[in-house]
Image (tube, grey):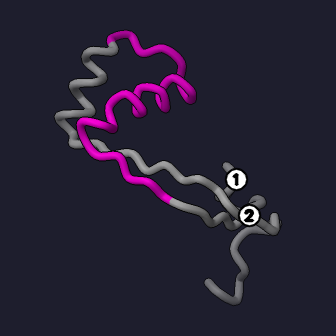
Amino acid sequence: MVSDDWDGPWVQVSGTAEVLDLPDSVEPLVEYFRSIAGEHPDWDEYREAMRTQGKSLVRLTIERWGPVATGGFPAYLA
């Protein structure tokens, strides 16, 4: 997980991933949109767009994390 700033803090996470494909991904994608952007003006249109675009969703259950690193990507690895 990285911060909004490219050279900002980041943390490594590990856990179990679950992939939700259509049609199971549509309602969780609605929940995701609501959590980051609020209400959509036309939910039926949004759902249809997710189906048309073949969208999937990956859920990560974080089991371990850390440490928080600062200073961005190490220069010696660039």
Report the Cα–Cα distance between label 1 and label 2.
Answer: 15 Å
Image location of residue 60, percent across then percent down: 54, 53
Q: Quadrant of residue 54?
A: top left
User: Left of 75 or right of it: where is 70?
Assistant: right
Q: Which of pointers 1 and 2 lies earlier in the amino acid sequence?
A: 1
Position of residue 5 relative to residue 72, above or below, is above
Image location of residue 27, percent across then percent down: 37, 27
Please state which amino acid type lies under the numbered disc 1. Answer: Ser
Residue pictured at 48% horizontal, 58% vertical: 17
Q: Quadrant of residue 70?
A: bottom right
Image location of residue 46, percent across then percent down: 30, 22
| Residue 31 belongs to magenta span | yes
The quarter of the image holding the C terminus is bottom right
User: Left of 4 or right of it: where is 28?
Assistant: left
Magenta highlight range: 17-42
Query: Which residue is denoted by mark 2 in the rendering?
Result: 65
Please state which amino acid type lies under the numbered disc 2. Answer: Trp
Secondary structure of the residue carrying tag 1 is loop
Whether residue 32 can be seen here:
yes
Residue pictured at 33% horizontal, 15% vertical: 43
Residue pictured at 28% horizontal, 42% vertical: 55
Residue pictured at 49% horizontal, 49% vertical: 59
| Residue 41 belongs to magenta span | yes
Residue 3, label in figure: 1
User: Left of 66 or right of it: where is 28?
Assistant: left
Image location of residue 19, percent across then percent down: 38, 53
Secondary structure of the residue carrying tag 2 is strand
Q: Quadrant of residue 66?
A: bottom right
User: Left of 68 or right of it: where is 59?
Assistant: left
Pointer 2: residues within 10 angstroms few (<14), some, or many (20+)?
A: few
Position of residue 12 relative to residue 25, above or below, is below
